Image (cartoon, rainbow, N blue to C red):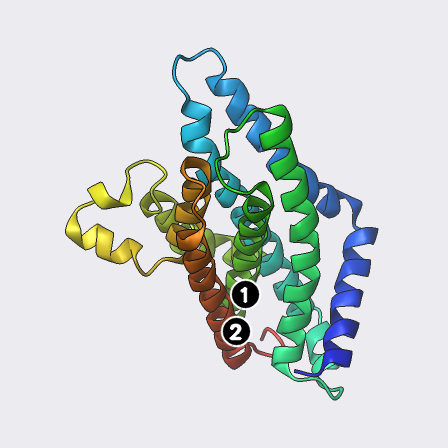
Amino acid sequence: MTPRILFAVSRRVVTQLRRDRRTAAMLLVLPCVLMTLLWWMFQDIPGSLFDRFGPALLALFPFIVMFLVTSVTTLRERSSGTLERLLAMPMGKLDFLGGYAVAFGVVAAAQAAFAVALSVGLLGLEVEGPVLLLGIVAVADAVLGTALGLFVSAFARTEFQAVQFMPLFVIPQILLCGLFVPRSSLPDVLHGVSDVLPLSYATDAMQTLVTTPATGDVWRDLGIVAAFVVAALGLGAATLRRRTP
C-alpha cells in the first residue's frame, strides 16, 4: 500500500460521509441511542443487568453498524462504476480497501468516544480497567465490522444481497460471543466454533475490562481482533471485483 494513495482514498470517503448527513448521524448517534435504550430497559429491574449486558453490546453495536454501512457503500462504489475508474489509476485493490478502513476507523474513533463516554459517564457502566482501553476496544470492534463488510461486499451484486450477508456473518457471532450464555458453558462443538469467530474476542475484551483491572488478556484479545482485520482486508483485496456484472 502507498501512503499517499491511502490518504487520498480515506480523505475521499470522509468527505462523502460529511456530505451524507443522515449516514454520518447514524454512525455517530445510533450506538449511543441503543446503549441508552438498553440502560432504560434495565433501569427498574433488580440486579446489575446493564453492567452484565452493556459491555458486550458496546462491542456489538459499532460492529453491526459499520458492517452494514461499509458493505452497502462498497457495493455502491462497484455497481456505479466508481471503483473501476479508481482502479484504472495507479491504485491497487489493497489501497482502496485500506483507505476505506482508515476512513471508517476515524469515524469509529469518534463513534467509540461518544458511546464510551455516554455509557461510563452518564449511564453508570462500571469499569474496573482503563476507560481509554475500553474506547480502543470499541474502535477495534468497529474496524472489524468495516473489514468484514469490505470482504463480504465482493460477493454481492445488489445492496439487498449485501444486507443478506448479515444473518450469515453477524448473527451467529452474536449468538456465540458470550452475550447470552458464557462461552465456557457452551456445548463443546459450539465453543469450538466460537473460538474462531472474531466477535468472541471483542466481547471477551470488553467483559474483562469491566470485571478486572488486569489488561493482559485484553491486549491478547485485541491482537486477535487485529489479526482478523488484516486477514479480512487481505481476502477482500483478493476477491474484490472492479465492477458488478
Q: Which mark is residue 38?
A: none
In the rendered image, the quadrant that contains the C terminus is bottom right
Instruction: Give the left or right position of residue 147, taking residue 78 as reference.
Output: left
Q: Position of residue 123 (x, y in %)?
A: 59, 24
Dot label at residue 153? 1
Residue 238 appears left or right of 108: left
Q: Which element is circle 2 on?
A: helix
Q: Can residue 30 be spotted in the picture?
A: no
User: With respect to residue 68, does 87 lie above or below?
Assistant: below
Residue 121 rendering spot, x and y as whole percentages: 63, 28
Is 168 in front, or is 184? 184
Q: Nearer the viewer, residue 153 or 119?
A: 119
- The quadrant in which residue 174 appears is top left
Instruction: Residue at 52%, 58% (x, y): give it.
Output: 144
The residue at the point 54 percent across, 64 percent down is 147
At 32% from the left and 61% from the top, the residue drawn is 196
The total number of labels drawn is: 2
User: Residue type at mark 2?
Assistant: Gly
Mark 2 or mark 1, which is nearer to you? 2
Q: Circle 2 sits on which residue?
A: 236
How packed is label 2: few (under 14 Cα within 10 Å), some, or many (20 or more)? many
Left or right for 10, reference 174: right
